[in-house]
Image (tube, rainbow, N blue to C red):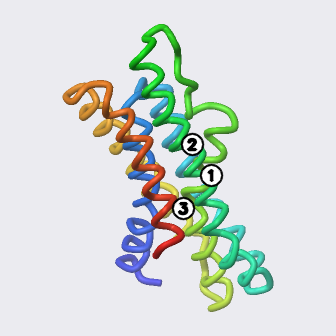
Amino acid sequence: MSVVETVLVALALGCDAFAVGMGVGTRFCNPRQIFRLSFHFGLFQMMMPIAGWFVGSRAADLVSTWGPWISFALLLFIGGKMAYESFRSLEAEDGECPDPTKGSSLVMLSVATSMDALGVGFSFGILGQQLFLSAVWIGITAGIMTWGAMRLGNRLSRQFGRRMETVGGLILVAIAVKLLLF
């Protein structure tokens, strides 16, 4: 795969991470949170193609069938929870919304945004292409895109107020629905 093709694949795979990062950044954007989400998204985006490459075509049918449903469920759950919590926090400012850059939410978001990368790894394995360097670039690109998206989401949140949290949650729900429809 050429450098240009690698960059294009990395950018395409980073789009989900960008969208999720922007949604999360509307509420959670301190340096630690930015690092955690960017690092984990980049790590998962790097590791999933490698895992897919190793498994290869043996499980390709399973992942192509269930992968979108798994991502849909994870993103729908987290996005719905974010939107719900944003409405709750508007009513009661004392309540604190759980941080999606920690614990199981972080893992679920990382898996959900990297399922496409798993599929890319499968296709590379089937085609017998080398993957490691491409996977590293995919991970770096996703991490950088997540970092930028969180900063952008935070800036939009400051400009448009607390309602951007609702928009952030709805972005995740929209991505979940898109996974099933397209």
Amino acid carrying mark 3 in the image: Val
- Please identify the residue farthest to the bottom as the structure is shown: 127
At x 65% / y 63%, what residue is drawn? 48
Q: Is residue 52 above or below residue 18?
A: below
Q: Is residue 96 above or below residue 138?
A: above
**Which residue is nearer to you in this view: 147 or 175?**
175
**Residue 17 coordinates in the image, percent (x, y):** 46, 53
Q: Residues within 10 Å of mark 2 (few under 14, many from 20)?
A: many
Residue 74, label in figure: 1
Describe the element under mark 1 as helix, strand or loop: helix
Cβ atoms under marks 2 and 1 closer than 8 Å: yes
**Residue 139 coordinates in the image, percent (x, y):** 52, 57
Q: Earlier in the sequence, mark 3 or mark 2?
A: 2
Describe the element under mark 2 as helix, strand or loop: helix
At x 51% / y 59%, what residue is drawn? 176
| Residue hosting label 3 | 136
Amino acid carrying mark 2 in the image: Ile
| Residue hosting label 2 | 78
Q: Is residue 80 left or right of residue 127?
A: left
Tell me the mark number nearer the camera, choosing from 3 and 2: 2
At x 57% / y 76%, what residue is drawn? 120
| Among the 4 quarters of the image, the one containing residue 91 | top left
- Distance from the alpha carbon under mark 3 to that under mark 2: 27 Å
Tell me the mark number nearer the camera, choosing from 1 and 3: 1
Q: Residues within 10 Å of mark 3 (few under 14, many from 20)?
A: some
**Residue 119 coordinates in the image, percent (x, y):** 61, 75
**Which residue is nearer to you in this view: 90 or 155?**
90
- Distance from the alpha carbon under mark 1 to that under mark 3: 25 Å
At x 78% / y 80%, what residue is drawn? 59
